[in-house]
Image: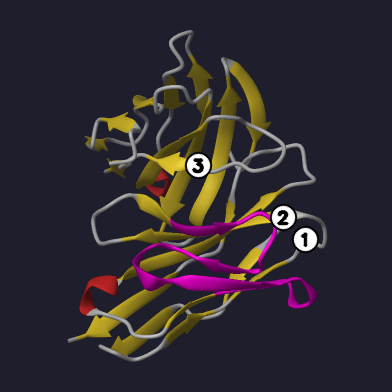
Amino acid sequence: AQSVSQHNHHVILSEAASLELGCNYSYGGTVNLFWYVQYPGQHLQLLLKYFSGDPLVKGIKGFEAEFIKSKFSFNLRKPSVQWSDTAEYFCAVNDYGGSQGNLIFGKGTKLSVKP
Amino acid sequence: DSGVTQTPKHLITATGQRVTLRCSPRSGDLSVYWYQQSLDQGLQFLIQYYNGEERAKGNILERFSAQQFPDLHSELNLSSLELGDSALYFCASSVEGGWGYNEQFFGPGTRLTVL
């Protein structure tokens, strides 16, 4: 079965530090990849998505992610974090080749940004 | 605001009881997904409906059931509730419901507390 691993449970950074959150998935076929963010007390919001084309995708709020097929990875990056980026980040995969449209989520990475 | 609405926002009930959670998808979306977010399991897919028909099933307990009505709103029924059912229940919707690109938009969630 498809699975998603997020390497860091909790990341603490100071403002202006660079961010990289790891995400690996298990399926070797065609996938759609997503990063969602959940701000405290709020619902999940889509940060960015990849489904084909340029493996470097840019999302909202200065986030970007790189799809590396050979490594089954889709890491999220931001060059300079802000206090307002404090949130939980979820990587998700939609198995393109499967019969289901649901998303499989990683366990999430909590990001705390110190002002 | 994603356009997906969920009611109620909070629900507190006792073990053994039955509750119904309601979700209205974005206008035009035919597919509804239910997810459970708990501290130990993370975000897990429960069930998907597409245009009134069950499309996919995930880690949904037999005590739980769902349906999608002709107006496309969906209800998730949780019965014989146990303490471990306490969680945040998210609904998401998408235009399509299966193969290929499948961006899902999430509602604000219903927080269920079982005492």
Mark 1: few/some/many CA within 10 Å (<14, 14-19, 20+): some
Q: Position of residue A65 (x, y in %)?
A: 54, 72
Looking at the rendered structure, the kind of residue marked 2 is Val
The quadrant of the picture occupied by the N terminus of chain B is top left
Which residue does the numbered mark 3 point to in the structure image? Answer: B104
Q: Position of residue B54 (x, y in %)?
A: 63, 22
Q: Residue at x 82, y 62 (%)?
A: A28
Which residue does the numbered mark 1 point to in the structure image? Answer: A27
Judging from the image, what secondary structure is the residue with disc 3 in? loop
Could you say which disc has been placed on residue A31 in the image?
2
Residue placed furthest toward the left: A115
Q: Which residues are magenta?
A: A47-75
Mark 3: few/some/many CA within 10 Å (<14, 14-19, 20+): many
Color scheme of the displayed model: secondary structure
Observer able to see residue B8: yes
Indicate whether A62 appears above or below A10.
above
Judging from the image, what secondary structure is the residue with disc 1 in? loop
**Quick check: A98 left or right of A106?**
right
Distance between the Cα atoms at labels 2 and 3? Answer: 15 Å
Judging from the image, what secondary structure is the residue with disc 2 in? strand
Looking at the rendered structure, the kind of residue marked 3 is Gln
